Image (cartoon, grey):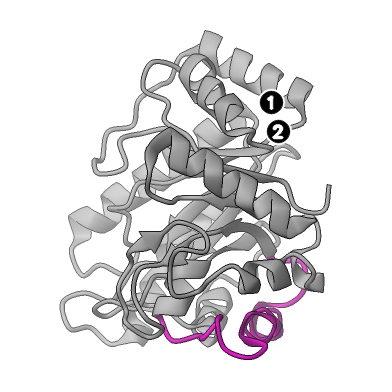
Amino acid sequence: MRNPVGGHVPVAGGLATVGLGYARTLGAETVQVFVANPRGWATPAGNPAQDERFRAECEAEGLSAWVHAPYLINFGSHTEATVDHSVTSLRHSLRRAREIGARGVVVHTGSATGGRPREVALAQVRERMRPLLDELTHDDDPFLLLESTAGQGSSLCSRAEDLGPYFDALDHHPRLGICLDTCHIFAAGHDLAGPDGMARTLDELVATVGEGRLKLIHANDSEDVVGARKDRHANIGAGHIGEEPFRTLFTHPATAGVPLVIETPGGPEGHAADVERLKKLRE
């Protein structure tokens, strides 16, 4: 399938029981999950029976699975405790991803806090995140997927060109990839809704990090206008990006085979409608 379409699913109560049950109600062809509290530092062991069932059922149904790492992770932080926790938390998400058969772990690129120069923060990214990539030595290890932010504060990556120095800091490691969030990149100033805006943005992304690095797309419309630097997701077609750019996204060479995951509002009904809308645009 050129672009499987699915969603981020809740897993409290069981990865397979609850998560895949929700995915089926959406008609999802791909799923994204948390394997830890997204707003905490806890690193739960997981349930081996649920892990095995999740892995087996995803395989049987042809669903690719993805893990989103906790939001607190920031390898650019000036606080030593935050960086230490970030290492532990990301290592946990990568290990759990392998245990459940997930193809990649999405992590936000973070920010340079405490008024530090971006170069200092990126040197720390290199020192602390690079060794985690070197631990990915198994064939079934996940990719580490960098997700740029909407440009709030002292963000290290918000526009496509910002990913260049971040990739340089990590030596363009073979296990490194990109998760493109359409709302974030629009909020950061890439006008996806303008003439050829989506195609130009994807071209720029490929020119910055190289071909084959885009592994996952978070398909979200935006409640705010282009360049607003606000991360407020809207349902597909109901925001300032609109439907047409998503239709373009499905035909661009850089997105061939890349799954789309929605992180939109509206609960099960809103999510199912967005999955259906994207499938129609894919046609």
What is the quadrant of the C terminus in the image?
A: bottom right
* Residue underneath mark 1: 58
Frontmost residue, 188 versus 130: 188
- Of mark 2 and mark 1, the one earlier in the sequence is 1
Rendering quarter of residue 37: top left
Frontmost residue, 217 versus 237: 237
The extreme top residue here reads 49
Q: Is residue 116 visible?
A: yes
- SS class, disc 2: loop
Residue drawn at point x = 57 percent, y = 88 percent: 194
Residue 98, given in percent of the width and then of the height, sits at 60, 33
The answer to whether 5 is drawn above or below residue 42 in the figure is below
In the image, is residue 192 part of the stretch drawn in magenta?
A: yes
Circle on res. 63:
2
Type of the residue with mark 1: Cys
Contact flag, marks 2 and 1 (Cβ < 8 Å): yes
Direction from residue 166 to residue 258 in the image, left or right = right
**Residues shaded magenta:** 188-213
Q: Is residue 157 visible?
A: no
